[in-house]
Amino acid sequence: MAEVYHIPAMLRETIDGLNIKPEGTYVDVTFGGGGHSRAILEAGAGRLFSFDQDADALKNAIDDSRWEFVHSNFRYLRNWMDFYGVDGIDGLLADLGVSFHHFDCPERGFSFRFSAPLDMRMNQTAKRTAADIINTYSEEELARIFWLYGELKNGRQIARNICKARLNAPIARTEELVQSLTPLFAIRDGEIDVPPQKKKELAQLFQALRIEVNDELGALREMLVAARDLLKPGGRIAILTYHSLEDRLVKNFLRSGNLEGEIEKDFYGNILTPFTLIEKGREASEEEVERNPRARSAKLRIAEKREITKS
Ligand SMILES: C[S@@+](CC[C@H](N)C(=O)[O-])C[C@H]1O[C@@H](n2cnc3c(N)ncnc32)[C@H](O)[C@@H]1O
């Protein structure tokens, strides 16, 4: 069966919310399977730049003269727009995190379901893999990322187990990491069969590691600031988040217009923010979750750049 590269979440809600202007310039910073990008072009965008740091996404290239693929981390959004001579955009979409392709492709090492090298790099030319982190971070550093990015209450215990195990030999494969949480499991035909009650914790552990490997929050912060400055008045930013940490960051940024989330007020007490909120954390409909269970954790936030911004 042909691989489903990705099924986009809240496709209609996102495109409607972007309020596409015919002939406007748009950016999709997370191209993936290209579902959202195609819909932006169908809605009449004049020009679309689609970013993805994973070269695999180019399999989904769109044959359209209005479309440009930018094989780069979206943290360099500003540099690339300068390169293309674009000084203002009418809208930007970010559908954060990884695609189905990443989870479903065993050799990429994103999933605890498959026996594979512990890789987890979205950009396959990046230097640092998940195995590098697991084998070189201190116990405290590991515990911190498990707690912070995976919300694992037993992060300290898991970090301790990992550090003990790696004294014998480096941890190089997914199943060796699974071992730190679940001593008993079977592997059949390359698939790791873990007890059902351990699946949630393992998903949290793998998520934490993936966020660290790809510096997902650092890239998001840089992109948000660039997007704020590039958006034209009336332009919209739409962001789909998938876990509480990135969602909180996006929520505070769109409310305040800054990474600190500090709401500034003028002399009269009026709130000074560059954005008007359009969608405040919309979730996928039950019908969509039924069709596409991975849309369950998605939250859609949309804001419009105001006409007058503070100097
Ligand atoms: C959730 S998928 C996007 C799916 C897409 N909306 C679609 O319709 O198929 C996220 C994609 O963004 C890419 N990505 C994630 N973080 C990135 C970053 N910092 N820079 C560039 N691409 C990134 C991933 O490689 C992945 O292909």
Image (tube, grey):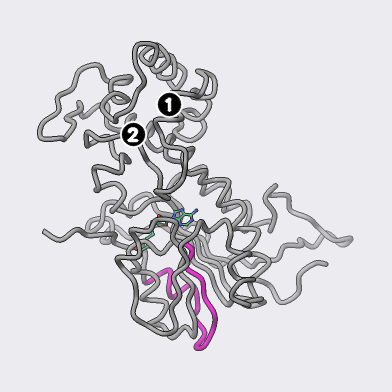
- Residue drawn at (49%, 37%), measured in percent from left and top? 212
Seen from the viewer's position, the closer of residues 247 and 206 is 206
- According to the picture, the residue beneath numbered tag 2 turns out to be 118
The answer to whether 291 is drawn above or below residue 199 in the figure is below
Q: Is residue 18 magenta?
A: yes
Secondary structure, mark 2, is loop
Q: Amino acid at mark 2?
A: Leu
Q: Position of residue 193 (x, y in %)?
A: 16, 30
Quarter of the image that includes the N terminus: bottom left
Seen from the viewer's position, the closer of residues 87 and 155 is 87
Q: Are marks 2 and 1 in contact (CB under 8 Å)?
A: yes
The answer to whether 311 is drawn above or below residue 1 in the figure is below
Q: Amino acid at mark 1?
A: Ile
Where are the magenta residues, as a range?
12-29
Q: Position of residue 232 (x, y in %)?
A: 65, 76
Q: Quadrant of residue 299?
A: bottom left
- According to the picture, the residue beneath numbered tag 1 turns out to be 134
Quarter of the image that includes the C terminus: bottom right
Q: Is residue 97 magenta?
A: no
Secondary structure, mark 1, is helix
Left or right of residue 2, residue 173 in this image? right
Ligand number 1: quarter of image: bottom left
Q: Quadrant of residue 276?
A: bottom right
Q: Position of residue 7 (x, y in %)?
A: 29, 61
- Residue drawn at (37%, 72%), measured in percent from left and top? 12
How far is mark 2 from mark 1, CA to CA? 9 Å
